[in-house]
Image (spheres, rainbow, N blue to C red):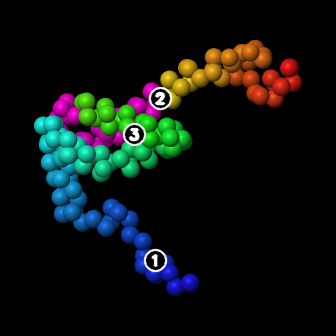
Amino acid sequence: MNDPRAQRPRIKPAQALSATARAGAALQDAQLIQRSQGGDMSAFEGLVAKYSNLVGSIAYNIIGDVHVAGDITQDTFLKVYRHLPELEEAKRFKGWLCSIVRTTCVSRRSARRGSSPRARSSGACSGRRRPSWRSCARRS
């Protein structure tokens, strides 16, 4: 039971980085964004590698399905790639990215609700909008 991880106090990532390190990370982001805006694919791949876990986590927390969250992550980075030249301030990248994830999730969720077979045949068993499976089984 002598687990070395249990003996060390856990440090949150925000506490682990000094102000200088955070400033360096922001500078690195600014450089990656500037190079990506200039068409450097390796810089954009660096942004994807750095932020893909964040994007996937946000998508999963909103949608609740890991496979759909993966699709949303891809869609998000495709939108980022297409609209990156429109980003004026590199320091706003993370917030801009998070807003793209959220709107992509909301769009995906509303599109699925409108096109799902359950939603199309919602009034088949009763006059209610969404009958339960039990009420359908009783009427059959």
In the current view of this chain or complex, which residue is farthest to the front?
A: 42
Q: Residue at x 30, y 50 (%)?
A: 49
- Residue behind mark 1: 5
Residue tagged 3 = 73
- The residues bearing labels 1 and 2 have C-alpha atoms spaced at a distance of 40 Å
Residue under the point 42% across and 45% down: 56
Q: Position of residue 20 (x, y in %)?
A: 18, 63
- Residue 96 among those drawn in magenta: yes
State which quarter of the image contains the N terminus: bottom right
* Left or right of residue 26: residue 96: right
Q: Secondary structure at mark 1?
A: helix
Q: Is residue 115 above or below residue 22?
A: above
Of pointers 1 and 2, the one earlier in the residue sequence: 1
Range drawn in magenta: 84-108
Residue 3 left/right relative to 122: left
Q: Which mark is on residue 108? A: 2
Kind of residue indicated by mark 3: Thr
Q: Confirm whether the magenta stretch covers residue 92.
A: yes
Position of residue 115 measured from the top left corner of the image (x, y, whole percent): 56, 20
